[in-house]
Image: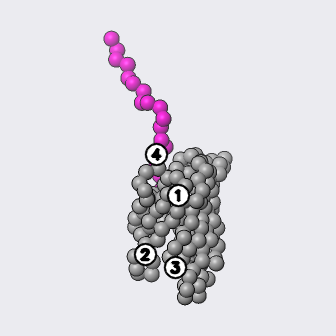
Amino acid sequence: MFVVDAEVEIERPVPEVFAFVADMTNAPKWQSGLHAVYRIPPGPVRVGSEHVFERRFAGRTLKSRNRITELQPPTCIAFEIPDGWISGRAAYEVTPTETGSRVGCRMEFRARGLGRLLEPLLGRVLRHDSRRDDLRLKAALESQPAPTNAAPARRRRSE
C-alpha cells in the first residue's frame, strides 16, 4: 500500500472550494491526464454516487470508477476505488484559513497483481502529480470571478 498526503491553500471561501472539489466532474479542469468524468446516476453528489474517470497513463487510456462513501458539506468528501488494478480510498477536507481555505487530500492505494511491484514508483509519481495538480486547482479557483448573490443595482432615471 502507498499513501499520499497533499495540501494547498486557496484564496476562496470554504463553501465555494468544497463545492468545486466535491463535484468530481470538475476534476479534468485541474487534474492532469484526466480527460472526462461522468457521474452515475446524473444529479447531485450524494453518498453512493459513482463516477467513471477516463485518464491517460503510460500512453494508454484507462477507465476507473469511484464511489462516494462520506459527504459532509462544506468540509469533507471521501470516496473509494473498489475495483481495478489499483484500489483504495481518498478524502478531501476543506478548512478555513485567514485568507480563504486549505484543501487537504489523503490517498491510500494498493496495486494488485504484478502492479504491487510498481507501488514505490506509483507513489512517487502520484506525489509529484498531486503537487502539480494542487497548484492547478488553486489557479483554477483563484482565477474565477467571485460569485455575487446580490442583484445588480438598477440605475435611476432622472425625471
Q: Is residue 156 above or below residue 48?
A: above
Of marks 3 and 2, which one's residue comes earlier in the chain? 2
Front residue (pair 145, 60): 60
Dots 3, 2 in contact, CB < 8 A = no
The Cα atoms of the two marked residues, 1 and 4, are separated by 32 Å
Which residue position holds label 4? 145
Labels 3 & 4 near each other (Cβ < 8 A)? no
**Main secondary structure along the magenta-highlighted residues:** loop
Instruction: Check the image and report above or below for 11 versus 148.
Output: below
Q: Amino acid at mark 2?
A: Leu
Q: Position of residue 11 (x, y in %)?
A: 57, 50
Circle 1 residue: 48
- Image quadrant for the N terminus? bottom right
SS for dot 2: strand
Q: Nearer the viewer, mark 2 or mark 4?
A: 2
- Tell which residue pokes out farthest to the top in this image: 159
